[in-house]
């Protein structure tokens, strides 16, 4: 039995949470993958996976072995990469990336020609979604995420800080007046931006020195997309809190007016996350470094 190949098969099954999906990504017949797992469990003398009709679950031995496999396979990749010819270390192959729709378009998609020019041997499959993708189960190499990250086995690299602004169209302010304090702000109508994943409105937080004020803002329109939030604000449908990179041209052209700049909304971290087992891949390292450089060059996203 090829132990390294068996480890790779086991890890892929766990990541995909499916023999069928793992077989597809490994380009193997499902029967061959099943046979490999049977031989591996027989060799180890323990059960690694509990199989049910709906899902797979790691046994305690399976969890320990999975974590050890990640370390071993990662060490093998790193050792091989350090000794292979320079051309073998050149980024190449398919890279699957998940991006939040609005930030991904602004930061990454509009600059893709530059990445392709620098790394012509890397092909990209970009998922543009605001749902929380499970990287391991869906075989995604890397994801761009905004906000605090939950504890997980993923490696996280913080690349920037998303800054926000409270703003309104001049037409709205002409009708309703301009709020000068947080207390006055809370009396105004706002465009309610809610999460398409959870259905809950995003909080309106404002940073006042060390203190954070959280407001309950209501209004006649609620939207789940960041671009729609900005579009509604431009039409004077209410105050809005938006990422500064989204509205900076509107602010510069006077189509929107920043409100309470001394007490801005709280900022949020921007991170790239990826499975530990993929750290050594040159294509991933190249992409991570490239996106980090893009964020560093953006005044509204830099660290």
Image: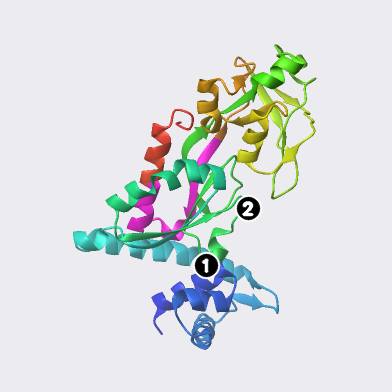
Q: Is residue 102 left or right of residue 56?
A: left
Please give the name of the residue rendered at 57% of the width and 65% of the height, measured from the top-left corner. 137
Do we see residue 182 in this rendering? no
**What secondary structure is marked by label 1?**
helix
Q: Is residue 109 left or right of residue 256?
A: left
Please give the name of the residue rendered at 44% of the width and 79% of the height, measured from the top-left corner. 27
The residue under label 2 is 131
Residue nearest the viewer, comparing 135 with 276: 135
Q: Position of residue 25 (x, y in %)?
A: 47, 73
Position of 229 relative to 279 (above/below): above
Q: Position of residue 176 (x, y in %)?
A: 76, 17
Q: Position of residue 139 (x, y in %)?
A: 51, 64
Position of 34 relative to 84 (above/below): below
Q: Which residues are magenta?
A: 269-288
Q: Position of residue 265 (x, y in %)?
A: 63, 25
Q: Residue furthest top?
A: 180
Residue nearest the viewer, comparing 302 with 191: 191
The residue under label 1 is 66
Give the number of the mark in front: 1 or 2.
2
Q: Quadrant of the N terminus?
A: bottom left
Please give the name of the residue rendered at 36% of the width and 51% of the height, measured from the top-left corner. 285
Q: Residues within 10 Å of mark 1 (few under 14, many from 20)?
A: many
């Amino acid at each position: 039995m090829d132990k390294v190949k068996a480890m790779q098969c086991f890890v892929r099954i766990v990541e995909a949470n499916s023999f069928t999906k793992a077989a597809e990504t490994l380009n193997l017949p499902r029967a061959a993958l099943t046979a490999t797992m049977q031989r591996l469990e027989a060799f180890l003398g323990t059960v690694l996976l509990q199989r049910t009709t709906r899902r797979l679950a790691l046994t305690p031995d399976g969890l320990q072995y999975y974590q050890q496999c990640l370390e071993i396979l990662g060490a093998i990749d790193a050792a091989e990469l350090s000794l292979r010819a320079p051309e073998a270390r050149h980024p190449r192959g398919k890279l699957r990336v998940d991006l939040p729709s609005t930030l991904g378009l602004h930061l990454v998609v509009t600059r893709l020609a530059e990445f392709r020019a620098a790394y012509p041997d890397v092909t990209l499959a970009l998922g543009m979604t605001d749902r929380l993708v499970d990287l391991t189960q869906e075989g995604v190499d890397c994801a761009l995420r905004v906000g605090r990250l939950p504890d997980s086995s993923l490696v996280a690299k913080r690349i920037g800080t998303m800054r926000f602004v409270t703003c309104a169209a001049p037409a709205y302010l002409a009708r309703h007046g301009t709020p000068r304090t947080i207390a006055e702000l809370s009396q105004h109508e706002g465009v309610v931006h809610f999460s398409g994943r959870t259905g809950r409105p995003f909080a309106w937080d404002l940073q006042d020195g060390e203190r954070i004020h959280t407001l309950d803002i209501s209004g006649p329109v609620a939207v789940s997309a960041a671009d729609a939030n900005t579009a509604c604000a431009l039409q004077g449908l209410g105050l809005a809190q938006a990422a500064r990179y989204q509205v900076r041209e509107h602010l510069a052209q006077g189509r929107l007016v920043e409100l309470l700049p001394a007490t801005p909304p709280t900022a949020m971290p921007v991170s790239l996350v990826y499975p530990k087992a993929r750290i050594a891949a040159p294509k991933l390292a190249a992409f991570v470094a490239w996106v980090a450089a893009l964020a560093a060059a953006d005044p509204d996203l830099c660290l």
